Image (cartoon, coloured by chain):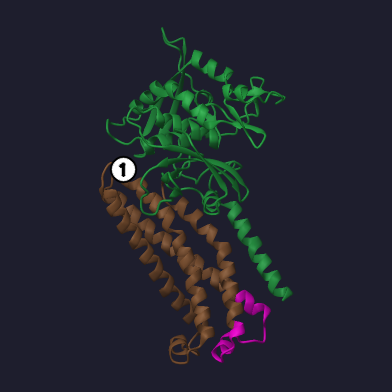
Amino acid sequence: MFYETPDIQFFSTIIYLVLILFSAVIAIMGSILIISFFTGRAINEKEEIVANRNIGMALVLGSFIWTIGRMCFETVKPTMNAWYSAYSAGFNIKTALKLTLGILGSQVIALIIGAVTIYISVKGLMIFTRGINEWEEIKNGNNAVAIIISVTVVVVGMFFESIISTIVVNLFDY
Amino acid sequence: MKVYLLFLSVLLLLVNVISLSLPGPASKFSAVPGPAAAVNISGDAKVKAPAAEGEKDHIQVTFKWTNIKKEEIVSLLKIPKKTLNVEVRNFGISADIKMLHPRYLKKQGFKLLTGKPVVDYREVYSRNLKNFKEITADLKQSAQIKQGVDPLVDFLRFTQQMDYRIPPKIYNGRYIREFYTPLLCLEKKMGDCDTKTILLADLLGALESFREELGIVILKGYGIFHAILAIKRKPLPGTLKLYFRGKGYFMPLEVSGPGWNPGFVGRNTFNCLKAGLFRFGTLN
């Protein structure tokens, strides 16, 4: 069952690599989308980072990628656990479909919780600092504001991380 | 600054409330061990089959559990009464813990660790191996595990689905340090982390073809006091591995609650292992 065939090493490695790559892609794409949502049309974050070498903007985007990335990686272990169960029970089309849906579902959950975490931390911070337009400050090169936003996002993300694996573990039928 | 700190505190409180409302991983202190998964164990009620003719010297215990293919399995295990009585008599020290002679402790399945009597898991494991030959064969047969097929996952699931309850400190007038010996664990149909860990070790160790090294990992930290089994095996991608110098790679087996395959443990256990807050001892 569990170690019956040598194929398990091969297939598990492929699944593991796909999951990690998928998590990384979701983290990067999701972060770019979220930062575009926050900055709106007034600021072009790509131009700010590439052309203007705005460290503050890069810091904030980096913190977004870090937070969503950590959340997506949290789904990898429970997914692999479900994969080994499926493999040991005998792999067929039905279980393959269920596993694929589970992988997609867990990544989407991670992305949504990551986005909500970032939204809560940034908006929460903005409520307490009324009168300051953080994005305008970051655009003007105020790195201190960028550091505060980044640290808040990362710290709040660390609190929410533990929820992800619990949700994903319960998502799969072990 | 104060407002910023207040904001972070409120968020932390919110996350804790959400985390507490979700079912968590197994630990010594969890009321409901493991994630909410397809668990099907016979429950608190002890189902004992009526003793058949010529089987009065055995206690028959029925277990209902689900195997890896999610099929319901009914296992009828026979525990020899005489052996069980000997086991109960030979485990546990005097309740007032005044007698701490090493030979007495060894005879009673205990040993001294930093001046305190603790369960000698290695001793309990090795002296129970002979008692488990028949039980393991019965379990293997009831689970329809074919010859040459690795029974690790099914045996792990069987142990995981047993009731998680902490044994008493005193049993039969003796101090047992919240540990039931494997036969008593089967008879009672319950156990906590270390009890179930040694039960699984004996189930595996009693297999004729079993040649792998086993070890017990005692974790203490991050609010948990927990035990898991470790088996010397080549780790698979994505699984947790423990490396011990001179011994090689071991794969952890979480027996407390259902939901974990070999090589997967709960978050707190993982953090504890990662921080090195554990002791490891070989069993065979």
* Residue B242 pos. (x, y %): 45, 48
Quarter of the picture holding the N terminus of chain A: top left
Question: Which quarter of the picture shows residue A157?
Answer: bottom right
Is residue B139 rendered to the left or right of residue B24? left
Task: Judge whether residue B67 can be spotted in this image.
Answer: no
Residue at the image position 65 percent from the left and 29 percent from the top: B169
Judge by depth and name the residue closer to the eye, A147 or A34: A147
- At label 1, the amino acid type is Tyr
Question: Which quarter of the picture shows residue A2?
Answer: top left
Q: Is residue A59 above or below residue B32?
A: below
| Residue where numbered disc 1 is placed | A3
Residue A81 is inside the magenta segment? no
Judge by depth and name the residue closer to the eye, B2 or B251: B251
Colour chosen for chain B: green
Is residue B52 rendered to the left or right of residue B218? left
Magenta extent: A123-145
Q: Secondary structure at mark 1?
A: loop
* Residue B212 pos. (x, y %): 37, 36
Colour chosen for chain A: brown
Question: Which quarter of the picture shows residue A130?
Answer: bottom right
Protein chain holding label 1: A
Tell me if mark 1 has few (under 14), some (14-19) or many (20+) residues whose alpha carbon lies within 10 angstroms of its own: some
